[in-house]
Image: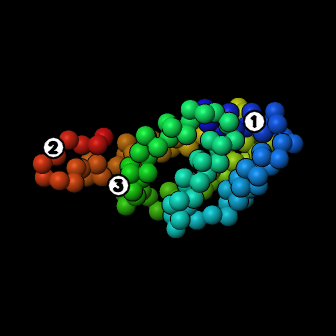
Amino acid sequence: MTARLAAAAVRNGAGHSKLRVYQRALQPYRDREYDLAGAPQLRQQFYDILIRLTGNSQLPSLFPTMRIHLLRLQTQMYRGPHATRSDVDDFAAVARAVLEGDASAAERASCAHHRRIQKSLLDMPSEAFAAESAGDSGMIR
């Protein structure tokens, strides 16, 4: 939804000065200039830019509650060697569609990224989700 709304905002307000700032901020993602493994804050920045582009007042309060960054940190060592490159390619596809104002393509690219991540999580061994403390018998999965 976020990618779709961001692309629609670009399409509907392409000349707006505030949008141009966010569009410039997305260009390095589109151009695959970032090392997402070496700078995890760039992932959060990517989503923050998309959220700001949407103009939706509810999205900023939803994203922090999802705790995706904790899951990413917990499972990072279990991801394959090409995972970061795939993430960069996925972010580039989303950014390209958003910058083109193509809401359908942005949603498809975002969904493809999330499906790939979901599949990689499901393929991980149970140890990737084991609770840290001995008192926790539950799994995060």
Q: Earlier in the sequence, mark 2 or mark 3?
A: 3
Q: How many residues crowd around disc 3 within 10 Å: few (fewer than 14), some, or many (20 or more)?
A: some
Alpha carbon distance from label 2 to label 1: 45 Å
The answer to which quarter of the image holds residue 15 is top right
Q: Which mark is residue 9?
A: 1
Whether residue 33 is visible: yes
- The three-letter amino acid code for the residue at tag 1 is Ala
* Residue 16 point in image, percent of width and height: 83, 42
In the picture, measured across the screen, residue 30 lies left or right of residue 116, that is right
Mark 1 near mark 3, Cβ–Cβ under 8 Å?
no
- The three-letter amino acid code for the residue at tag 2 is Ser
Q: Residue furthest left?
A: 135
Q: Which residue position is annotated with label 3?
A: 74
Q: Earlier in the sequence, mark 2 or mark 1?
A: 1
Q: Secondary structure at mark 3?
A: helix
Residue in the image at 12% along x and 48% along y: 135
Q: How many residues crowd around disc 1 within 10 Å: few (fewer than 14), some, or many (20 or more)?
A: many
Q: Nearer the viewer, residue 60 or 35?
A: 60
Quarter the N terminus occupies: top right
